[in-house]
Image (cartoon, rainbow, N blue to C red):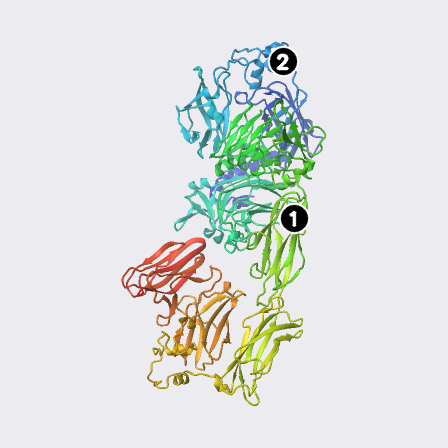
């Protein structure tokens, strides 16, 4: 035992508790092991008892309260408790206090008087509750179970009760006897109802209805409210109830006379200082509110009330603070607050601080820690938060040694960071794992990055939840998740819910308890690293009671999302209040009939116990109702605003369909002298039995809805019940599961069954080895990229879209999978996925096997070969286009304009047989055969044209440089003439260049005749083309590749080369990359020409047109060209004044970039600039013609960054050279 404890408490700061722990365990073991009937501290029950009448509600302080509890595991174990109602608590706030004894393994003789307590949990159900024999009900019906354990000793439970009995009224004056007797009135004299006992202008009956003392003169203003509750670190609306029988709210003035440290009062945007005044009308208009500091602990403040008659009252008001630390027995199991990290000494990593330990504020010592320095998250002092970076897998272990919560409720405040296609684990616990997924990167699918909302995915044993509701735009998210054996619930505190389904078989991998990643047992590293900020995280044991859950949501929304909380739960008199439009409001009603008027933002109304009138005004408002709510009215419920009626606190544990619990009908009202009006009545039965009148009603003014509207109201989220849902299945029905490349389109149907009356948008994921927009396209759905959206309008049960395959030249097995992403509206996922194969179409190419045909006797034929790859199983006819200077059937034997591959045949030949008598002038002619495109039947791969030259002898087709210049310049000495500078036609192209590129030496030629063209072909491959002279025996052309503009290597192995004859003087040389251009690893490409082994010429840089994160791109009206003399440097040559040229490169960070540069600028007015993301990092106007090395520049942030090298020229002498560009990723 000693060794185990030392191991478990090995952290140094915990060893101090070791001795105490051992002594306590030993002492407890002796007592519990040797004695039965050991008495533990009692459980305390307390609360209000309210009686409701149509015209008033009163709190009871007289009568006998009887509570009967039944042990759920042992129904024979019943406990009956009685107590008299009596004023208790501060200022008579509560109606009763009751202590219940607890005993460890009690003997049978005392079982009826004491709660059984042991190491295991014991659950008692409230079997009956009465007040003077009248049935009383729990205000919060989810408190119907009382649990006891060792860990729950000394708990206090607030149980507010309500009765709806008709109190004895002996004289029928509408004032119950007990109230009259309490205040000294005559319960047998009806006439005292209209008397004004205290002379303040209110009759005794009005005093009852106003909740005031009929013996106290109310003409002087008095404070009815005894306390207000504010959320810690939040913004609280400040409502106080003032009674004055003869003054209007505008004539009642309040002076702030005593403040308390840590609390600031505001009148709209103005701080209220001690001595400042405001009116009671300001209070009712929602102008007063408060803020408080993180160390605010509550206390008392004071006011002076004065009316127009100079009646003055000095009053005190208790300000209570709500935070997780004030919950007593309901306090969290663990609580992490990033604002508390300011007091933690973190490890330093360069200029940043890393967090090695995050202290648990719950008091249980379940701290989060990270012993490995490289895996520690970062502390952001500017935001006051803890930051996790996905790339480096930062995370924290949770100390779960005393973890007891298999069922729990979790609250998290976080800001999501970088998105990718992998799950990101926010929290991994013993029974559930909470992950974030964006499901597309935003880099490759930029225009789709916000189409599919951020998805929170929870995996539990046997269950899974997928909700689509976290913000992906950098704003803070507020998440709540609760689980127990029957149901799990996930929502974002603003009305978006998702529920687990038991039919999903999921078993989370056994892992350590962690924040920011998943770390499976035995793994070498953490997985699914989270990227973003974690501001606060709390975990509570079990599923919370709805009232406590709503209070915690108020705390988090106020603290982290700028909501203003109006906590009126303690108010026993009617409240009429207008919210403010500068903040979103949360109204929590009290015991009486309240009236709330919201602002213009997205307000939340949490209904109280009375019959309330709620008006949301504009904004997407949430109206939340509880089992203890009265019969309420929503004045302006609007579907168009996105309003929601939230009934989940009542029905989240129910099953079945909504029709079992709700009934909608419209009611026509006729008021004298007014036009008739129509309202909708929502009647609710809590258990779906409908044995008596409805348990609760909601009236929607001005709407005409019936039971037929309930499915779309629930389906579209305007009414949220929680558990009960309508069944809906979404099915994918492809017309064909075996697709072929190049077909125009295939129709695919998506249908839904079950509930079809609601409008629903779903998201379709596209995956598989086939790539969308490269191997196939989608039409008829919204968006682009790997996720598409589709919408069923109301009443629609099917829709169609088209998938069109794209021909390519790859021999591959492809498939595409379509899957509907999960949605809270879908209950059946049995047919939400479909896969289809995409078979290769036949691929045809052509080339000349023998490119010279001779007019000899007998003739020597040229041979052209057609090749078929891909599908060769069937007979295939290919149409041909025959052209060239040679005429088919005149200069060579007639060939057919089509040819046919037999089934299984992959090659066939076409012979070009010259007629020996066809020509007498000895000139060469070209026979060219091209494949006619037929995308319905085959794909083409370059080359799709081949040519044969028909000559008298083979020698006629060959050319060498010496013979070529001798023929054109017979008077020049070939040994002394400098052909590299000789330009006979003064067109700027020297004689050697004219030879290489088949140019006419007697006519002016264009520079375009020797420039390169580079583009992506239809198959997505890089294609480079240029024209040269034909049949040059002593010239060669080579494609060179470089990563840094300094070292160049041959690209022969990376490109397929071919030659297409244009005529008897020129050919086109074609280089096609073997890999698609978006995966090529080399950046720069150029052509080098040689004559008799001597490098002569290098072509322009060939930039690809593929994904921007792979290549350097050129723009501007200047041209970057290579230079042999400068060792393969890219530079600008001959740019003119006013021209600009730019090299752009996109790279994912973090990275370091370096390069060498040389600026030639005679006048010093040219600007060379290097920038990252538009921010200049290096700028030069140097006139020195010398190489300089840029100091390496680092970029620490992740994401895609834009690099630009630019020159703004002022005259033709300006130039810039670059080389040795080095970009290194920082790991």
Foreground tag (1 vs 2): 2
> Is residue 511 visible to us here?
yes
Q: Which residue is mark 2?
A: 173
Label annotation for residue 238: none
In this figure, what is the number of numbered marks?
2
Using residue 607 as the reference point, say whether residue 476 is left or right of it. left
> Is residue 1227 visible to us here?
no
Of 132 and 691, which appears nearest the observer? 691
Distance in Å between CA atoms under marks 1 and 2: 62 Å
Q: Residue 1002: percent from the left, percent from the top? A: 39, 79
> In the rendered image, which quarter contains the N terminus?
top right
Using residue 930 as the reference point, say whether residue 1112 is left or right of it. left
Using residue 539 as the reference point, say whether residue 1169 is left or right of it. left
Pick whichever of labels 1 and 2 is earlier in the sequence.
2
**Splitting the image into 4 quarters, where does residue 194 fall?**
top right
Picture layout, residue 190 above or below residue 725: above
| Label 1: how many Cα within 10 Å (few below 14, some 14–19, many 20+) | some
Of 644 and 654, which appears nearest the observer? 644
Picture layout, residue 714 above or below residue 206: below
**Splitting the image into 4 quarters, where does residue 943 fall?**
bottom right
Using residue 410 as the reference point, say whether residue 1204 is left or right of it. left
Q: Residue 568: percent from the left, percent from the top? A: 53, 28
Residue farthest to the bottom, as pictured = 857
| Label 2: how many Cα within 10 Å (few below 14, some 14–19, many 20+) | some
Q: Which residue is mark 1?
A: 504
Picture layout, residue 654 above or below residue 210: below
Q: Circle 1 sits in a helix, a strand or a loop, which is it?
A: loop
The residue positioned 41% from the left and 66% from the top of the image is 1044
Q: Circle 2 sits in a helix, a strand or a loop, which is it?
A: loop
> In the rendered image, which quarter contains the C terminus?
bottom left
């Amino acid at each position: 035992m000693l060794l185990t404890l030392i191991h478990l408490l090995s952290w140094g700061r915990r060893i101090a508790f070791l001795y105490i722990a051992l002594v306590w365990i030993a002492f407890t073991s002796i007592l519990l092991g040797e004695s039965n009937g050991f008495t533990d501290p009692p459980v305390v029950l307390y609360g209000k008892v309210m009686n409701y009448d149509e015209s008033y509600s009163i709190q009871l302080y007289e009568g006998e309260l009887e509570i009967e509890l039944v042990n759920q595991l042992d129904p024979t174990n019943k406990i009956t408790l009685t107590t008299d109602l009596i004023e208790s608590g501060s200022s008579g706030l509560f109606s009763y206090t009751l202590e219940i004894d607890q005993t460890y393994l009690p003997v049978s003789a005392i079982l009826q008087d004491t709660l059984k307590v042991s190491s295991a949990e014991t659950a008692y159900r409230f079997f009956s509750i009465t007040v003077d024999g009248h049935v009383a009900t729990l205000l919060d019906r989810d408190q119907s179970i009382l649990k006891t354990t060792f860990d729950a000793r000394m708990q206090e439970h607030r149980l507010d009760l309500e009765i709806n009995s008709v109190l004895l009224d002996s004289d029928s004056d509408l004032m119950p006897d007990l109230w009259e007797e309490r205040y000294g009135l005559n319960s047998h004299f009806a006439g005292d109802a209209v008397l004004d006992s205290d002379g303040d202008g209110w009759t005794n009956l009005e005093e009852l209805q106003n909740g005031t003392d009929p013996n106290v003169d109310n003409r002087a203003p008095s404070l009815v409210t005894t306390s207000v509750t504010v959320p810690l670190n939040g913004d609280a609306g400040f409502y106080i109830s003032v009674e004055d029988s003869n003054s209007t709210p505008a004539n009642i003035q309040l002076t702030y006379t005593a403040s308390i440290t840590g609390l600031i009062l505001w009148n709209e945007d103005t701080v209220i200082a001690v001595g400042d005044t405001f009116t009671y009308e300001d209070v009712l208009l929602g102008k007063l509110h408060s803020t408080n500091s993180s160390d605010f602990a509550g206390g008392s403040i004071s006011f002076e009330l004065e009316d127009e008659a100079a009646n003055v009252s000095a009053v005190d008001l208790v300000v209570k603070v709500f935070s997780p630390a004030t919950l007593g027995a309901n306090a969290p199991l663990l609580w992490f607050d990033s604002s508390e990290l300011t007091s933690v000494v973190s490890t330093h990593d360069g200029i940043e601080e890393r967090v090695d330990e995050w202290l648990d504020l719950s008091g249980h010592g379940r701290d989060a820690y990270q012993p490995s320095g490289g895996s520690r998250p970062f502390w952001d002092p500017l935001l006051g938060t803890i930051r996790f970076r996905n790339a480096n897998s930062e995370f924290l272990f949770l100390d779960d040694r005393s973890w007891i919560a298999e069922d729990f409720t979790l609250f998290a405040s976080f800001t999501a960071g970088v998105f990718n296609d992998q799950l990101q684990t926010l929290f991994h616990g013993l029974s559930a794992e909470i992950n974030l997924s964006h499901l597309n990167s935003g880099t490759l699918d930029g225009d789709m990055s916000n189409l599919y909302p951020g998805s929170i995915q929870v995996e539990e044993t046997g269950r899974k939840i997928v909700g689509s509701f976290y913000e992906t735009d950098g704003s803070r998210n507020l998440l709540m998740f609760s689980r127990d054996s029957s149901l799990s619930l996930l929502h974002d505190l603003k009305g978006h819910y998702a529920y687990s389904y038991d039919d999903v078989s999921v078993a989370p991998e056994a892992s350590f308890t962690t924040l920011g990643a998943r770390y499976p047992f035995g793994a070498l590293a953490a997985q699914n690293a989270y990227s973003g900020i974690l501001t606060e995280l709390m975990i509570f044991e079990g599923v919370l009671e709805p009232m406590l859950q709503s209070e915690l949501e108020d705390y988090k929304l106020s603290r982290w999302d700028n909501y203003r909380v109006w906590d009126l739960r303690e108010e026993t008199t009617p409240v009429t209040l207008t919210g403010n439009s500068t903040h979103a409001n949360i109204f929590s009603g009290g015991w009486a009939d309240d009236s709330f008027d919201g602002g213009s933002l997205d307000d939340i109304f949490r209904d109280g116990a009375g019959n309330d009138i709620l008006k949301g005004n504009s904004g997407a408002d949430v109206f939340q109702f509880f089992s203890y709510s009265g019969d309420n009215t929503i004045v302006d419920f609007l579907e168009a605003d996105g309003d929601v009626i939230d009934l989940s606190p009542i029905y989240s544990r129910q099953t079945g369909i909504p029709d079992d619990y709700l009934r909608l009908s419209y009611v026509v009202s006729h008021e004298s002298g007014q036009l008739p009006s129509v309202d909708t009545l929502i009647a609710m039965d809590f258990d779906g039995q409908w044995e008596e009148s409805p348990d609760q009603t909601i009236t929607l003014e001005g709407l005409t809805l019936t039971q037929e509207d309930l499915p779309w109201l629930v389906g579209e989220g305007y009414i949220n019940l929680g558990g009960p849902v309508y069944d809906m299945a979404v099915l994918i029905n492809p017309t064909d599961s075996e697709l072929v490349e190049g077909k125009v389109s295939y129709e695919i149907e998506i249908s839904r069954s079950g509930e079809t009356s609601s409008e629903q948008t779903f998201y379709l994921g596209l995956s598989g080895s086939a790539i969308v927009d490269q191997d196939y396209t989608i039409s008829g759905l919204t968006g682009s990229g790997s996720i598409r959206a589709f919408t069923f309008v109301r009443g629609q049960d099917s829709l169609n879209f088209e998938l069109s395959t794209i021909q390519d030249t790859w021999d591959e097995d492809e498939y595409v999978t379509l899957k509907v992403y999960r949605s809270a509206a879908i209950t059946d996922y049995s047919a939400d996925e479909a896969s289809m194969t995409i078979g290769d179409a036949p691929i045809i190419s052509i080339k000349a096997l023998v490119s010279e045909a001779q007019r000899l006797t007998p003739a020597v034929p040229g041979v052209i070969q057609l090749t078929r790859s891909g599908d060769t199983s069937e007979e295939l006819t290919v149409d041909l286009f025959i052209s060239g200077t040679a005429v088919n059937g005149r200069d060579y034997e007639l060939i057919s304009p089509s040819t046919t591959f037999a089934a299984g045949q992959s090659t066939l030949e076409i012979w070009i047989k010259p007629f020996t008598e066809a020509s007498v002038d000895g000139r060469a002619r070209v026979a060219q055969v091209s494949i006619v495109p037929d995308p319905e039947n085959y794909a083409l791969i370059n080359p799709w044209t081949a040519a044969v030259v028909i000559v008298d002898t083979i020698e006629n087709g060959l050319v060498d440089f010496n013979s070529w210049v001798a023929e054109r310049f017979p008077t020049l000495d070939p040994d002394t003439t400098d052909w590299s500078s000789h330009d006979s036609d003064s067109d700027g192209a020297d004689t050697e260049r004219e030879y290489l590129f088949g140019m006419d030496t007697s006519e002016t030629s264009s520079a375009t005749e020797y420039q390169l063209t580079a583009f992506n072909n239809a198959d997505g491959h890089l294609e480079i083309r240029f024209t040269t002279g034909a049949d040059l025996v002593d010239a060669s052309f080579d494609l060179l590749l470089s990563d840094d503009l300094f070292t160049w290597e041959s690209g022969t192995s990376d490109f397929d080369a071919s030659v297409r004859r244009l005529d008897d003087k020129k050919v086109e040389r074609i280089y096609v990359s073997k890999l698609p251009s978006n995966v090529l690893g080399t950046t720069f490409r150029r052509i080098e020409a040689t004559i008799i082994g001597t490098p002569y010429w290098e072509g322009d840089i060939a930039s690809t047109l593929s994904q921007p994160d792979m290549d350097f791109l050129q723009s501007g009206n200047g041209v970057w060209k290579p230079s042999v003399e400068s060792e393969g440097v890219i530079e600008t040559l001959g740019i003119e004044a006013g021209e600009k040229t730019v090299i752009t490169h996109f790279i994912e960070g973090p990275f370091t970039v370096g390069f060498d540069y040389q600026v030639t600028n005679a006048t010093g007015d040219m600007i060379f600039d290097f920038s990252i993301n538009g921010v200049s990092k290096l700028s030069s106007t140097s006139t020195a013609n010398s190489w300089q090395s840029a100091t390496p520049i680092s970029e620490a942030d992740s994401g895609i960054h834009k690099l630009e090298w630019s020159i703004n020229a002022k005259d033709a002498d300006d130039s810039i050279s670059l080389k040795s560009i080095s970009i290194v990723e920082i790991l």
